[in-house]
Image: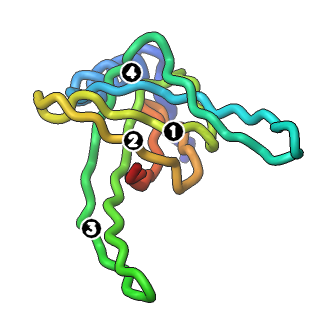
Amino acid sequence: MTPQIWTETEKDKMREAAEWHMADEGYRKVWSVTIDEVGDDIETWTQAASPTPCGIEAHEGRENKSDLTTTTYEITIRLPVGFEIDQKDHFLITSFRGDVVSWEYEITTPIQAGVSAIRFGARKIEH
């Protein structure tokens, strides 16, 4: 039996349906590094000029107790196929379920490119 392979038309329909379910919005924050006068790395993240639709899947937060208790909130972010993002970049969510927010996340899992979307796990950055 030969495997079922999707046609380009079917893939386009899958991508369109996936993007239809990306009701949130955010910006890629591009990572860069410079070296200061004493040789230390200075990392910066520059916000992209245009927002992109995204889908947010929130996961339950958890507390890590040690000398200091920290709470970690993790999510999965879905972006349109072909969206360019690097493992060291951050992602700034500016609209979540119709509400204006300003949540910055760092990428914590490999970026997975699927047929209808790309996705990755992320952890909220507390400034």
Between 2 and 8, the one lying in front of the other is: 8
Residue at x 47%, y 32% (from the top left corner): 115
Q: Which is nearer the N-term, disc 2 or disc 3?
A: 3
Single out the mark in the foreground, 1 or 4. 1
Secondary element at tag 4: helix
Secondary element at tag 2: strand
Q: Which residue is mark 4?
A: 10
Disc 2 crowd, CA 10 A, few/some/many (<14, 14-19, 20+): many
Please identify the quarter of the rendering in which residue 20 is found.
top left
In three-dimensional space, the C-alpha distance between marks 1 and 3, rounded to whole angstroms, equals 19 Å
Q: Which is nearer the N-term, disc 2 or disc 4?
A: 4
Tags 1 and 4 touching, CB below 8 Å: no
Single out the mark in the foreground, 2 or 4. 2
Between 99 and 86, the one lying in front of the other is: 99
Looking at the rendered structure, which numbered label has been put on residue 104? 2
Q: Residue 43 appears at what percent x and percent y?
A: 67, 40
Q: Residue 118 appears at what percent x and percent y?
A: 47, 36
In three-dimensional space, the C-alpha distance between marks 2 and 1, rounded to whole angstroms, equals 7 Å
Tags 4 and 3 touching, CB below 8 Å: no
Q: Which is nearer the N-term, disc 2 or disc 1?
A: 1
